[in-house]
Image: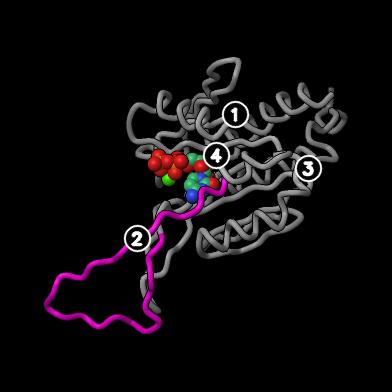
């Protein structure tokens, strides 16, 4: 059948996606962030839109142009990302957390640029809220999909995260290989087991992931 005649797997559904890193200020000009490019999250947002969903993308600073989806919200810190997600989550059927959220923020960031001196500088870090865990523990959560970035024991750690956050689906992602590379291998972990998405570019992986999400979602919501 012509692809145009295929029913769109996410037609009429609203999908909320987080992407990119967050940035936690140290002072007026410095901060703590990580090496997430945002490419995977943007590819997921695009693939969901192509599957017929109304997509809201909440993105940390990436420096790359966002995809053409229904709504894009640019945020900086994890706290801001949480607020942007909370403001939209009640409307969402599916939540896909691709963002590499900073696990800590800097307590008492300096309003001015910190001047150097000869002493050791100590930063105090406090834990950030876990956006995905907050969403998945709502009374009526959307269908929640997590990404597990691991550098060792990939599938074991990813499955532990899936259980801990009560997720129907998590995407295991080897962070040491994924960073800076255009092609990734992903493993989907759900109640039925493991599904390997063999090495491919991020757009392809995003399409495969979205089709898997659509199958699970539509099976649970006939
Ligand atoms: N996540 C989130 N908010 C956070 C931290 C993580 O929403 N503050 C989401 C990520 O978007 C991802 C999933 O939780 O979908 C797993 O993130 P990851 O960093 O791999 O796991 P953590 O639970 O933060 O544990 P750790 O970093 O210690 O492995
Ligand atoms: Ca983390």
Q: Nearer the viewer, mark 4 or mark 3?
A: 3
Q: Are marks 1 and 2 in contact (CB under 8 Å)?
A: no
For image coordinates 55% across by 16% down, the residue present is 193
Q: Position of residue 25 (x, y in %)?
A: 41, 69
* Residue 83: numbered disc: none
Q: Earlier in the sequence, mark 4 or mark 2?
A: 2
Q: CA distance from mark 1 to mark 2?
A: 30 Å
Residue 193 in the figure: left or right of residue 57: left
For this view, does 74 lie left or right of residue 29?
right
Q: Main secondary structure of the magenta part?
A: loop
Q: In this figure, which residue is indicated by the disc labeled 4?
A: 202
Residue 185 visible in rendering: yes
Q: Could you tell me which secondary element the residue under label 4 belongs to? A: helix
Secondary structure beneath dot 3 equals: loop
Q: Nearer the viewer, residue 81 or 19?
A: 81
C-beta proximity under 8 Å, tags 4 and 3: no
Select label 4 or label 2 by which is in front: 2
Distance from Cα at disc 3 to Cα at disc 2: 38 Å
Residue 30 percent location from the top left of the image: 36, 72
Whether label 4 touches label 2, CB < 8 Å: no
Give the residue number, with chain letter if any, for mark 1: 169
> Which mark, by number, is residue 53?
3
Q: Which mark is residue 125?
A: 2
Q: Which residues are magenta?
A: 105-132
Q: Secondary structure at mark 1?
A: strand
Residue 214 locus on image (x, y percent): 73, 29
Mark 1 or mark 2, which is nearer to you? 2
Q: Quadrant of residue 150?
A: top left
Of badges 1 and 3, nearer the viewer stands 1
């Amino acid at each position: 059948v012509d692809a145009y005649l295929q029913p769109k797997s996410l037609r009429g559904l609203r999908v909320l996606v987080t992407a990119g890193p967050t940035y936690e200020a140290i002072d007026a000009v410095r901060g703590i962030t990580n090496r997430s490019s945002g490419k995977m999250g943007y590819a997921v947002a695009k693939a969901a839109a192509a599957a017929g969903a109304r997509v809201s993308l909440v993105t940390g600073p990436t420096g790359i142009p966002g995809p053409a989806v229904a709504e894009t919200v640019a945020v900086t810190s994890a706290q801001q990302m949480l607020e942007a997600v909370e403001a939209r989550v009640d409307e969402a059927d599916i939540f896909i957390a691709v963002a590499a959220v900073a696990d800590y923020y800097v307590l008492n960031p300096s309003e001015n640029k910190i001047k150097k001196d000869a002493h050791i500088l100590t930063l105090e870090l406090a834990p950030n809220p876990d956006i995905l865990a907050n969403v998945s523990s709502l009374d009526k959560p959307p269908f929640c999909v997590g990404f597990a970035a691991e550098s060792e024991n990939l599938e074991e750690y990813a499955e532990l995260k899936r259980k801990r956050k009560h997720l129907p689906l998590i995407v295991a992602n080897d962070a040491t290989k994924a960073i800076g590379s255009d092609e990734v291998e992903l493993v989907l972990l759900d109640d039925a087991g493991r599904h390997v998405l063999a090495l491919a570019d991020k757009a392809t992986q995003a399409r495969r992931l979205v089709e898997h999400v659509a199958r699970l979602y539509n099976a649970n919501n006939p």
